[in-house]
């Protein structure tokens, strides 16, 4: 269910302007307090988008699931001669 559109007034916040996001809109957009967001101007409006956190190597490896039939090792076959594999 989409949040009801809301009109808000821009308020001065130091040298910037600030706006409050209604809880219903923040909840639907899955935005949370202290979350990093990216602001950009799009077709005469402003877009607020969550910043995607970069996963650590350990997190990426833990989440990795090979596709069916995909080799899971660097060398899928045993060396046949004097090859050097690094």
Image: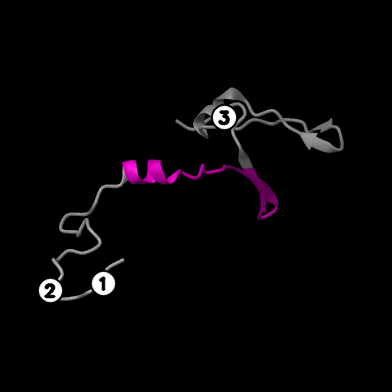
Vertical placement of residue 49 versus 23, above or below? below
Single out the mark in the foreground, 3 or 1: 1
As measured in the structure, the alpha-carbon distance from the residue carrying label 3 to the one carrying label 1 is 55 Å
CB under 8 Å between discs 3 and 1: no
Q: Is 44 covered by the magenta stretch?
A: yes
State the mark number for residue 45. Answer: none
Q: Quadrant of residue 8?
A: top right
Residue underneath mark 2? 80
Mark 2 crowdedness (10 Å alpha carbons): few <14, some 14-19, many ≥20: few
- Closer to the camera in the image, 54 or 85: 85
- Compare marks 2 and 3 and give the one earlier in the sequence: 3
Residue underneath mark 3? 26
Q: Which residues are magenta?
A: 38-62
Vertical placement of residue 40 versus 78, above or below? above
Q: Secondary structure at mark 3?
A: helix
Q: Residue at x 52, y 35 (%)?
A: 29
- Closer to the camera in the image, 18 or 63: 63
Q: Secondary structure at mark 2?
A: loop
Q: Quadrant of the C terminus?
A: bottom left
Mark 3 crowdedness (10 Å alpha carbons): few <14, some 14-19, many ≥20: some
CB under 8 Å between discs 2 and 1: no
Mark 1 crowdedness (10 Å alpha carbons): few <14, some 14-19, many ≥20: few
As measured in the structure, the alpha-carbon distance from the residue carrying label 2 to the one carrying label 3 is 60 Å
Q: Position of residue 27 (x, y in %)?
A: 52, 27
Q: Residue at x 73, y 32 (%)?
A: 19
Q: Quadrant of the N terminus?
A: top left
Q: Position of residue 64 (x, y in %)?
A: 30, 47
- Closer to the camera in the image, 26 or 43: 26
Q: Is 23 covered by the magenta stretch?
A: no
As measured in the structure, the alpha-carbon distance from the residue carrying label 2 to the one carrying label 1 is 11 Å
Residue underneath mark 1? 84
């Amino acid at each position: 269910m989409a949040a009801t559109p809301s009109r808000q007034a821009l308020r001065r916040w130091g040298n910037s302007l600030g706006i409050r996001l209604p809880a219903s809109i923040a909840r639907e957009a899955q935005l949370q307090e202290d979350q990093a967001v990216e602001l950009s101007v799009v077709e005469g409006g402003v877009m607020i988008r969550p910043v995607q956190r970069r996963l650590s190597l350990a997190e990426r490896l833990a989440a990795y699931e090979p596709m069916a039939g995909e080799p899971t090792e660097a060398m899928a076959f045993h060396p046949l001669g004097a090859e050097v594999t690094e």
